[in-house]
Amino acid sequence: MEAVKVSTVKDVPAAAFITEYALYLKKTDKLELPAWADLVKTGKGRILAPHDSDWLYTRTAALARKIYLRPGLGVSVLQKIYGGSQDNGTRPDHFAKGSGQVVRCCIKQLEKLGLVQFFAKGSVEEKKGRCITKVGQIELNSIARQIKQ
């Protein structure tokens, strides 16, 4: 009898997983796109809105992957992850955080689907933030298995 190799999100390349999961979210029509999705910038340091019309699906898939790999992330940490360089003209560039509203919107959509939950632990030393639920692990690992095959 052959041993079945279990594929998880950690076993597949990030770019392949994010594109495949974003396509899955778009096909199943699980996300409710807000009215401002085509107008908003993704951070303070950006000049224009994203060119890709499906950018919110991609961002949601990337956030789901980040929360899967590092449970306990909050909005402020995710803002720093999705931040970047702000062009200051002739002056030197500096770091600018990503949009908190975009991160919160994506997380709320994932919570509504039952993939992510907020947890607050009792003691001061332990972290609090978002983590993937069992349903979320099953769904994300099934996408990873499809990529692996």
Image (tube, rainbow, N blue to C red):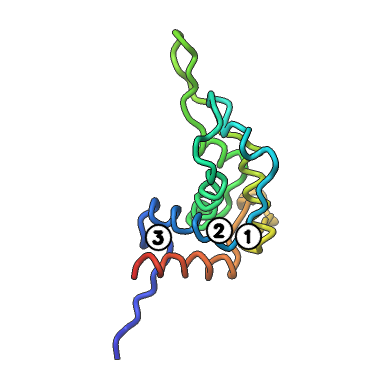
> Dot 1 corresponds to which residue?
30
> Dot 2 corresponds to which residue?
25
Number of numbered discs on residues: 3
Q: Label 3 near label 1: C-beta < 8 Å?
A: no
Q: Label 2 near label 1: C-beta < 8 Å?
A: yes
x, y (%) of residue 79?
57, 37
Nearer the viewer's eye, disc 2 or disc 3?
A: 2
Query: How far apart are the alpha carbons under marks 1 and 3?
Result: 24 Å
Task: Locate residue 31: give its quadrant.
Answer: bottom right
Mark 2 crowdedness (10 Å alpha carbons): few <14, some 14-19, many ≥20: some
Q: Amino acid at mark 1?
A: Lys
Query: Tag 3's secondary structure?
Result: helix
Q: Amino acid at mark 2?
A: Leu
Q: Residue at x 61, y 59 (%)?
A: 29
> Dot 3 corresponds to which residue?
10
Query: Tag 1's secondary structure?
Result: loop
Front-most of residues 21 and 139: 21
x, y (%) of residue 85?
46, 25
Q: Residue at x 29, y 86 (%)?
A: 2
Q: Which mark is residue 115?
A: none
Q: Earlier in the sequence, mark 1 or mark 2?
A: 2
x, y (%) of residue 140?
50, 64
Nearer the viewer's eye, disc 1 or disc 3?
A: 1
Q: Is residue 54 above or below residue 146?
A: above
Q: Is residue 8 above or below residue 99?
A: below
Q: Residue at x 40, y 60 (%)?
A: 10
